[in-house]
Image (cartoon, grey):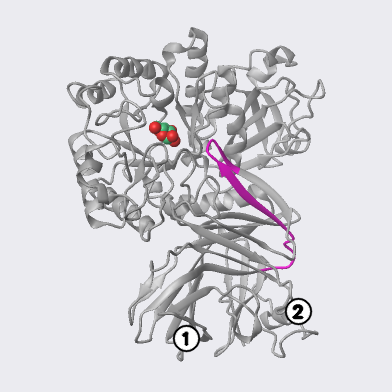
Amino acid sequence: MEFVRLDGERLTLVFALEMGGTADLAYLGPRLPGSEDLASLAAASARGRHESQPDMPPRPGLLPERKLGWSGTPAAALRRGDARVETDLRMTGWDVQAGALAVRFADRLAGVEATVSWRIGAGDVLRCGLALGNRGDAPLEIERCAALALPVPARFTGLTSFSGRWAAEMQEHRRPITPDGFARASASGKPGFAGAGWVLLHAGEEVLAAHLAWSGDQWLTLEPDSQGAADGRAVLMMGAGCDPGEVVLAAGESHASPEAVFTLAPDRSALAQAFHAHVRGAVLPARATWSPRKVHLNSWEALGFNLSEPALIALADDAASLGIERFVLDDGWFGGRRDDTTSLGDWTVSPQVVPNGLTPLIDRVHALGMDFGLWVEPEMVSPDSDLYRAHPDWCLHTPGRERPTMRGQLALDMARDDVRDYLFERLDALLRDHAIAYLKWDHNRDLFPSAPGQTRGFYALLDALRAAHPHVEIESCSSGGGRIDFGVLTRTHRVWPSDNNDAIERLRIIPAWSQFLPLEVLGSHVGPSPNPITGRRMSMDFRAKVAVFGHMGVEADPARMTEKERDCLAAHIAIYKQWRGVLHEGRLHRLAHPDPNVTGMMVSHADKALALVAQTAFSPVFDAAPVRLAGLDPQARYRVTLAEPWPPRAKHYLAGADQWRTGLTLSGAALMGHGLALPLTHPETAWIIALEKIA
Ligand code: GLA
């Protein structure tokens, strides 16, 4: 047995490697001293054989298999023709260098090779994958290939999974890890509104989280060692869904899983910071050269399908007067698309909307100092479209059967070269012919009947367009947050977290996504009041304060706002511009408060920090407990102000208003331990707290 360790800044992983045997994870936890005796460490957690176990107790390790009597699900499921391939993969060697370990396995009898790769990177996030190779003569079909098989340290006893629906993404469900385990799978051809690709495991405050960087179907299992066949540890596995026949390897070929990532951290704020470091350093394209995230105005909740050149120009003029920096023309600008029943696939500018094309509108937008963005939904086709009439066979369908629609549309078969060539030609022409800085790339139908190769086809199209137009920023939208994952984020610049712009709902949805994603990729728009999805009426002050904490935008018609509302919105856009350097570079802290209806988050960066504290429901008490901040230097002194404008009703209850305006001076220790007493008793009240370190 040999031991190999990978060290991050905070974490250590120790692997126990046995030539001709298995590869196991002997330690996963806080960083160990360099002098740690790894053999003793492994011995300290080794288990003796007990009753009702195979005589040689199996260790599932990094590549669980059924061999030797392990009763869980294997990491790889393989077939040759009609026969299942029962593997016995034995370790043949490993390479370790600069934070990366690759362990090689082979089963010469079955003609299969496997390589498990783990690499520790930015934020101490582990990036894991499994590659399978066919070393036999006959084709080898892969039915299952776990990107990650993680023996979970037994101290993790709780699990948070996520579910979601349209307009209510990422709902958290916490439960104990029970002996019957946990399994999730998505089947709509994309991760879905929460999907199977995100999970948290808890050991008290300590938290371990894993994610699959893949924009298609996926599965996740957590299998406790309930029958006691192994050593008592659960195994967490995740991988991409494989349709029958999707991955068949000819002799000599190999297949690599998408990347799965995981990390662990002492608490959920530290976990968010770890994933944000990973996303900023390793996922987002060209993050290092990004310019500040521009304030958007999106036409969807302002004009819907009532698009005309005069209406769009009036909207652009209004947008510019508020301080907007990017004007995004949403659905309805192409073909005969005057409502959502028609014309997807006909990606030509409609003269009914803009008689002289998009250029005069774009010129006006530029003259107003903004850049221009456009909505597209490339992977879809409306049955009522020229594209469908010309190519009825291009959509996903089963010959001879009905073609059920969703939102009146069908999905194109992205595995077809001719479909991707057509879409590339149309999108490339749009981007070549117009000064388009940004695409909102939507996807509003589940993929059924399922067909192999859709996600790879989507990635291929996106990659080709990005190579041809490297300066165009792209948003991943899928009826809101239906396709959000680190796979799509390696190719895009932001995501649309939800169609639900209701600020109360956003106070749940944004913190949920921000567990994994930094604020600069989370589109965060001020919607209309009443909100079109929830019907709630909310003050502009509340809506705008909540929207500052993300990539801010406006998705409402300023012409329908009062003068006061416009002033309030413009003031918050100015706050966003002043503070986005902090919000988009800094460390996010989740603020705890005894009232479950108070949500707090805070971002600290260098010598500054900005916090949002928001009350959503009527408080049972007159005086809510002081808000305790986080992530500050306890010894440093800070100037603390409440960013203006202040919430109109609540400000009457603020004691010593002048001091909050000129600034209180408090130590980090006092701010974190004692807190700030703010009026938080009215529903829909939010405060923005600004902090600057005093030299
Ligand atoms: C989807 C998106 C919305 C909007 C509409 C347009 O629902 O999520 O933001 O773009 O499509 O049809």
Question: Circle 2 sits in a helix, a strand or a loop, which is it?
Answer: helix
| CA–CA distance in space, label 2 to label 1 | 30 Å
Can see residue 692?
A: no
Q: Judge from the rendering whether residue 470 lies leftward or rightward of residue 263; answer left or right.
A: left
Q: Residue at x 70, y 68 (%)?
A: 224
Q: Judge from the rendering whether residue 281 lies leftward or rightward of residue 387; answer left or right.
A: right
Mark toward the viewer: 2 or 1: 1
When the figure is inspected, residue 646 is found, relative to residue 126, above or below; the finding is above
In which image quadrant can residue 646 be found?
A: top right
- Place of residue 427 in the rendered image (x, y in percent of width and height, measured from the top left): 24, 42
- Place of residue 606 in the rendered image (x, y in percent of width and height, measured from the top left): 56, 41
Mark 1 CB near ligand 1 (8 Å cut): no
- Place of residue 313 in the rendered image (x, y in percent of width and height, measured from the top left): 29, 17
- 266 vs 104, nearest the viewer: 104
- 204 vs 660, nearest the viewer: 204
User: What residue type is disc 1 on?
Assistant: Ala
Q: Residue at x 33, y 19 (%)?
A: 316
Q: Is residue 169 located in the magenta-colored stretch of the structure?
A: yes
User: What residue type is disc 2 on?
Assistant: Ala
Magenta-colored segment: predominant secondary structure: strand
Question: Circle 1 sits in a helix, a strand or a loop, which is it?
Answer: strand
Provide the residue span drawn in magenta.
152-170
Judged from this view, the residue extending furthest toward the front is 400
- Place of residue 314 in the rendered image (x, y in percent of width and height, measured from the top left): 33, 14
Q: Earlier in the sequence, mark 2 or mark 1?
A: 2
Q: Quadrant of ligand 1?
A: top left
Mark 1 — residue? 106
Mark 2 — residue? 44
When the figure is inspected, residue 393 is found, relative to residue 236, above or below; the finding is above
